[in-house]
């Protein structure tokens, strides 16, 4: 009987040690906005980027990738362009007429702020410059 008790004590100590050595899993911070309250806010600083995925994408003839990013937690969408040039414009709009745009000021990637996407659709577009003459747009999502 003593052997069983020693074996159980050893197993308990081993399990406790394993849990103590395991890295702590940290939950992603909760999003700070939802739907219309996300309009014109940054998806990264609000936490909306934490569960975001690319809902639609398109590639322009110059190789620029246009993505419509969507956060199901925030019910908001934004445009992201990558592999592009300084001066390029990313543009997002929803079916309620809300929109946002931003130009690449350095590097080759940029994303817009968000628009409401609760019970709406949105799309992302790319223009080679700030004239909003779109070279590529995603489909609506």
Image (cartoon, grey):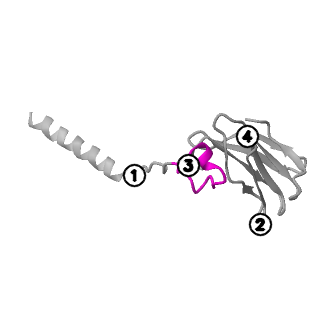
Q: In the rendered structure, which segment of residues is drawn in magenta?
A: 31-46
Q: Is residue 39 magenta?
A: yes
Q: Return the disc, 3 or 1, that comes first in the chain's sequence.
A: 1
Q: Residues within 10 Å of mark 2 (few under 14, many from 20)?
A: few
Where in the figure is residue 92, as x and y percent of width and height?
75, 47
Which SS class for mark 1? Answer: loop
Q: Distance of mark 2 from mark 3, alpha carbons?
A: 28 Å
Q: Return the disc, 2 or 4, that comes first in the chain's sequence.
A: 4
Q: Return the disc, 1 or 4, that comes first in the chain's sequence.
A: 1
Q: Which residue is mark 3?
A: 33
Q: Distance of mark 2 from mark 4, alpha carbons?
A: 31 Å
Q: Nearer the viewer, mark 2 or mark 3?
A: 3
Q: Nearer the viewer, mark 1 or mark 4?
A: 4
Which SS class for mark 3? Answer: loop
The reply to whether discs 1 and 4 touch (Cβ–Cβ < 8 Å) is: no
Q: Nearer the viewer, mark 2 or mark 1?
A: 2
Q: Which residue is mark 2?
A: 106
Which SS class for mark 4? Answer: loop
Q: Looking at the image, which residue sits at the far bottom?
A: 106
Q: Distance of mark 3 from mark 1, alpha carbons?
A: 27 Å
Q: Is residue 82 above or below residue 139?
A: below
Please report the residue visible at 56 percent of the width from the left and 53 percent of the height from the top: 46
Q: Nearer the viewer, mark 3 or mark 1?
A: 3
Q: Which residue is mark 1?
A: 24
Please report the residue visible at 73 percent of the width from the left and 40 percent of the height from the top: 96
Which SS class for mark 2? Answer: loop
């Amino acid at each position: 009987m003593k052997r069983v008790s020693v074996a159980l004590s050893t197993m308990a100590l081993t399990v406790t040690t394993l849990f103590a050595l395991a890295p702590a899993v940290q939950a992603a911070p909760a999003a700070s906005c939802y739907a219309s309250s996300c309009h014109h806010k940054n998806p990264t600083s609000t936490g909306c980027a934490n569960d975001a995925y690319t809902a639609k994408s398109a590639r322009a003839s110059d190789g620029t990738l246009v993505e419509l990013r969507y956060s199901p937690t925030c019910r908001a969408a934004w445009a992201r362009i990558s592999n592009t040039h300084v001066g390029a414009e990313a543009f997002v709009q929803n079916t309620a007429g809300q929109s946002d745009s931003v130009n690449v000021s350095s590097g080759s990637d940029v994303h817009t702020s968000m628009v409401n996407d609760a019970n709406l659709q949105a799309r992302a577009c790319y223009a080679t410059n700030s004239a909003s003459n779109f070279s590529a747009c995603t489909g609506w999502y």
